[in-house]
Image: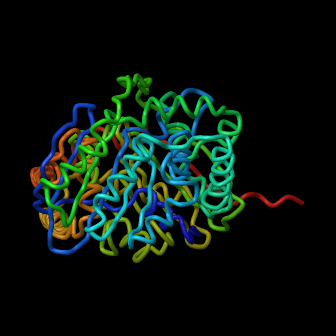
């Protein structure tokens, strides 16, 4: 996917927030540990079947990065009962579509089918869990696919490596320091036995949540779930013990070079707590205040009024263990990166020293209410939200009550959180520069 600007990269990587309207659901566990969530919506003859596995880029041994992302590809190779190359054919021929994606914290597979194909979708996901074919030929094929993906999206894409550069400077010990896609040498050096062991550990029912959302009959769907998933053996219990990061107490500066860009960028990043923390919700509001729309503080000041930046933005990039709060800008003309840094810091300083106005606070609340009202507009989004809130937040009901957290955030709390996490001595400043031309 071609990326035209750093803003596009950030928007795609860190994405918009999602909020939930009132959603009814039923959830329960199978004896093998698989958590099941069913949401019935008979307004359209469509169903989304999804499985989220609690495994992502951070789940790796040293020297074995990128396994979860690699498996995102590998588990489309085929199964005992679905031959190599026939997965997508089976989906297309039955009027469906499917995809998967991997973050540092989880992997998500899903199909969207006409609702009369619900049983087919459940059988296919049970095949992926129970009977995947993992052979050297498939490993070699997907290794080349992943390499091409890295070349396209990272190595040869404008601003494609900024995320890797930020992560490795913000994190020193935690696995978040390594790229989700992995280092290609690690994949090249890994054996088939190591891939098999990874599958046996993580792609098991007790490390997964199954969601079926859409035009379903609850009783009938429960029968199919039990038929196809009930006999899958439970896996071993998974224990995670990742190293803690020491607080950043002194500003750190770094530089990175990109041969694919002509305009430099300046990025400031602060390490922040888990997305399950209340502070992460407050930082969501800070991001909206600083850079959501043309009337936001950073955009109006640096792009419209002072004409110093081509683009400017702030993102709260939340993750399960730690997050990053990122502020970035691209300069206009001869504007220096130091000038951009100072102008961005001036707005953050105001957050630390002053309460935002009542007018701006109400504007924030209105935006979050609007997002809540318009969220989960289709069963595909609902399926994703249900899986995510259960698996990563440990509370499925957040799909309906998360808005209450935002409603309860005060102006004083915004100021306090800015003072806790967004100080100059807690930041990493990354200059992302065009590769110098060699003579």
- Image point (57%, 34%), residue name: 195
Q: Can the viewer see residue 203?
A: yes
Question: Could you say where residue 142 lies in the image, as x and y percent from the top left?
Answer: 63, 50
Image quadrant of residue 98? bottom left
Evaluate whether residue 166 shows in this view. Answer: no
Q: Residue at x 64, y 44 (%)?
A: 139
Residue, x 27% and y 52% (percent of image)?
351
> Between 152 and 173, which is closer to the camera in this rendering?
152
Q: Quadrant of the C terminus?
A: bottom right
Nearest the viewer among 365 and 338 is 365
Quarter location, residue 244: top left
Camera-side residue of 302 and 319: 319
Q: Quadrant of the N terminus?
A: bottom right
Q: Residue furthest right?
A: 439
Quadrant in the rendering for residue 228: top left
**Left or right of 420 in this view: 262:** right
Residue at 10%, 55% in the rendered image: 407
């Amino acid at each position: 996917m071609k990326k035209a600007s750093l803003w596009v990269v950030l928007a795609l990587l860190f994405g918009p927030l999602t909020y939930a309207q009132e959603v009814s659901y039923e959830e329960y566990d199978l004896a093998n540990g698989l958590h099941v969530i069913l949401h019935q919506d008979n307004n359209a003859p469509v169903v989304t079947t999804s499985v989220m596995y609690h495994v992502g880029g951070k789940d790796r041994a040293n020297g074995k990065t990128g396994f979860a992302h690699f498996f995102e590809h590998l588990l489309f190779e085929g199964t005992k009962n679905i031959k190599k190359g026939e997965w997508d054919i089976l989906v297309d021929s039955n009027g469906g579509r499917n995809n998967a994606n991997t973050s540092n914290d989880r992997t998500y597979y899903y199909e969207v089918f006409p609702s009369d194909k619900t049983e087919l979708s459940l059988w296919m996901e049970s095949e992926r869990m129970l009977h995947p074919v993992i052979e050297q030929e498939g490993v070699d094929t997907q290794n080349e696919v992943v390499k091409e993906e890295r070349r396209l999206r990272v190595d040869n894409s404008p601003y494609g490596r900024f995320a890797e550069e930020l992560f490795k400077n913000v994190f020193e010990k935690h696995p978040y320091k390594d790229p989700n896609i992995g280092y290609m040498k690690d994949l090249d050096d890994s054996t088939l036995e190591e891939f098999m062991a990874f599958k046996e550990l993580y792609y098991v029912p007790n490390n997964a949540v199954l969601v079926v959302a859409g035009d379903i009959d609850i009783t009938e769907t429960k029968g199919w779930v039990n038929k196809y998933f009930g006999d899958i053996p439970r896996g071993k219990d998974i224990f995670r013990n990742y190293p803690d990061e020491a607080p950043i107490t002194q500003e750190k500066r770094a530089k990175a070079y990109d041969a694919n860009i002509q305009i430099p960028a300046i990025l400031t990043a602060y390490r922040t707590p888990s997305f399950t923390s209340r502070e992460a919700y407050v930082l969501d509001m800070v991001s909206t205040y600083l850079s959501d729309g043309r009337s936001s503080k950073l955009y109006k000041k640096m792009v419209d009024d002072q004409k110093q930046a081509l683009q400017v933005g702030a993102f709260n990039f939340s993750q399960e263990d730690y997050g990053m709060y990122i502020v970035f800008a691209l300069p206009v003309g001869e504007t220096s990166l130091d000038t951009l840094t100072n102008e961005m810091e001036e707005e953050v300083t105001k957050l630390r020293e002053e309460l935002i106005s009542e007018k701006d606070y109400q504007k924030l609340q209105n935006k979050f209410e609007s997002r809540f009202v318009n969220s989960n507009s289709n069963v595909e989004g609902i399926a994703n939200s249900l899986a995510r809130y259960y698996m990563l937040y440990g509370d499925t009901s957040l799909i309906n009550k998360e808005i209450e957290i935002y409603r309860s955030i005060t102006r004083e709390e915004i100021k306090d959180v800015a003072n806790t996490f967004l100080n100059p001595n807690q930041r990493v400043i990354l200059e992302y520069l065009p590769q110098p031309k060699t003579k």
